[in-house]
Image (tube, rainbow, N blue to C red):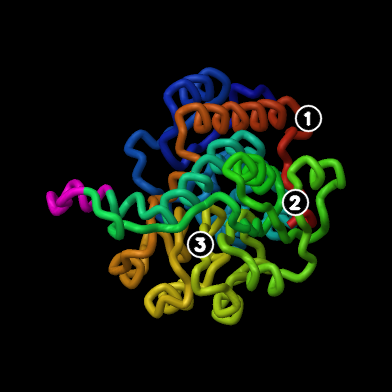
Amino acid sequence: MPQSKKRVVVTRKLPDPVETRMMELFSTVLNLSDEPMSRDQLAAAARDCDVLVPTVTDRIDGSLIEQAGERLKLIASFGTGVDHIDLRAAKARGITVTNTPGVLTEDTADMVMALILAVPRRLVEGNALITSGKWTGWAPTRMLGHRIHGKRLGIVGMGRIGQAVARRARGFGLSVHYHNRKPVHADIENELEATYWDNLDQMVGRMDILSLNCPHTPATYHLMNRRRLALMQPHAYVVNTARGEVVDQEALVEALKERRIAGAGLDVYEHEPEVASGLLDLDNVVLLPHMGSATIEGRQDMGDKVIINVKTFVDGHTPPDRVIETMF
């Protein structure tokens, strides 16, 4: 079938160059308002397109996939995570799923390090003190935070992003530890001077800073639950730039309120865009609006990957970023 006849529906506004190229290559329906599509709108789009281009905030579950028309053969997600898509249901319907891996690694790792610095050193509190006009000058015991150099960093999920975080952490003098489904290659472990922990509980209880960099899967849902948060040391910090569902948000709020852990840096939340009111009232957290990958360059690269995946698919070939359900 000529690719000019392929109907592609994009659920959110993408960078202008990406949308322009998609209009050139396909019969593309854009979302110019950038308002999130309702479930009914998503279902209608899935019934009347060959390719759906959703984002990580669009829930493409089994029920919605069942409503899809026979035309829908590709879900080309604009994002790395695929926990918003029912991969089994898509496979059962013969629908290919692709994502955009690799291009956000450095951007996300930069944000992890920013949070690792911001929370212990109280950067946001310091900025608020200045902007409130309440700063009265330097004093020996005011705005004291914790030193980063020499501390132990535990990385949960040593994939591309975890390894990029480890490289940055070494530059700040942090001791790198990690938990993964299996150890990384010995060459990588040696390069990063990283210590592997097979037992997550044991690692959690011995780290000064915990960075969550694993995908959200059934196995990682509430990985940091009430029991594991209780294992953390009182002076320890947790940083989450992965997925909000990896942490039991209610248990985290309790631990922070009761000062059972020192603080947290969060870029993702369990019920986005809602942020638990308990978090908003705390002074030992830094809260960001899911912006870990939000760079102009990163968004452009993501769009380019989507285009390559769609173009390859409509030309009758296997897309380079096809997601295999069994991988997750």
Q: Nearer the viewer, mark 2 or mark 1?
A: 2
Residue in view at x 47 percent, y 21 percent: 17
Q: Which residue is mark 1?
A: 317
Q: Considering only order in the chain, which callout, 1 or 2, is on the residue closer to the N terminus?
A: 2
Of the pair 25 and 47, the residue shown nearer to us: 25
Q: Is residue 128 magenta?
A: yes
Q: Residue at x 35, y 34 (%)?
A: 32
271 vs 65, left or right, is: left
- Kind of residue at badge 3: Gly
Give the alpha-carbon distance from disc 2 to disc 1, as whole Å: 39 Å
The answer to which of 145 and 250 lies nearer the viewer is: 145
> Would you place residue 33 above or below residue 66 in this image?
above
* SS of the residue under disc 2: loop
Image position, residue 294 (x, y; %): 45, 38
Q: Which residue is mark 3?
A: 244
Disc number lying in front (3 or 1): 3
Q: Is residue 131 magenta?
A: yes
Q: Hey, what amino acid is under mark 2?
A: Ala
For disc 1, the neighbor class at 10 Å (few under 14, some 14 to 19, many from 20) is few
- Find the magenta span and give its range: 127-137
**Mark 2 — residue?**
194
| Residue 26 seen | yes
